[in-house]
Image: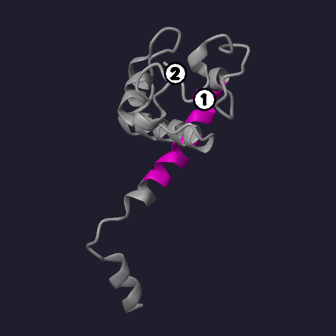
Amino acid sequence: MALAVAAACRHEPLPEVARAERDAAAGRRIFDRRCVSCHNANGDGKTIVAGRFPYANLRNGRWKSDGTLASIERQVRLGDDPMPSFAGKLTDEEIRQVATYVLALARAAGKGGGAEGAGGR
């Protein structure tokens, strides 16, 4: 019992990897509810709604911006025709979580994010 209490009271911060994994998992749930109609469940953008828009594909490494977490958050928050704004529809935390998941989609496809995955604008 004492070990459980001691472990629960540790003062060390949780690893950032664990936070990123939690954010990506939460982001996937949000993505599944709010984004699949345009971006498809696997993020490839091959949908009737948005298949003709080049940036609907979130897996190919082609970003409308630089592909960093901050720029994806900004895109989700503000929108940019044809993508709607999610400001007021999602909280700041939910926007960060869905952006984290979008980067995970690109990385899973081998296209990275940020400086290493910003090509093809």
The structure residue drawn at horizontal position 72% and vertical position 19%, both measured from the top left corner, is 47
Q: Is residue 28 magenta?
A: yes
Residue 93, by quadrant, is: top left
For the residue pair 110 and 29, the one nearer the viewer reads as 110
Q: Is residue 54 left or right of residue 1?
A: right
Residue position for label 1: 60
Residue 79, by quadrant, is: top left
Residue furthest left as drawn: 11
Q: Calculate the distance from the C-alpha at mark 1 to the C-alpha at mark 2.
A: 9 Å
State which region is magenta: 20-36
Q: Tell me which amino acid carries mark 2.
A: Gly
Mark drawn on residue 120 = 2
Q: What scheme was used to colour the molecule? A: one colour
Q: Nearer the viewer, mark 1 or mark 2?
A: 2
Residue 57 visible in the shown view = yes
Tell me whether circle 1 and circle 2 mark residues in contact (CB < 8 Å): yes
Q: Position of residue 25 (x, y in %)?
A: 55, 48
Q: What secondary structure characterizes most of the magenta part?
A: helix
Q: Position of residue 114 (x, y in %)?
A: 41, 35
Q: N-terminal of the two: label 1 or label 2?
A: 1
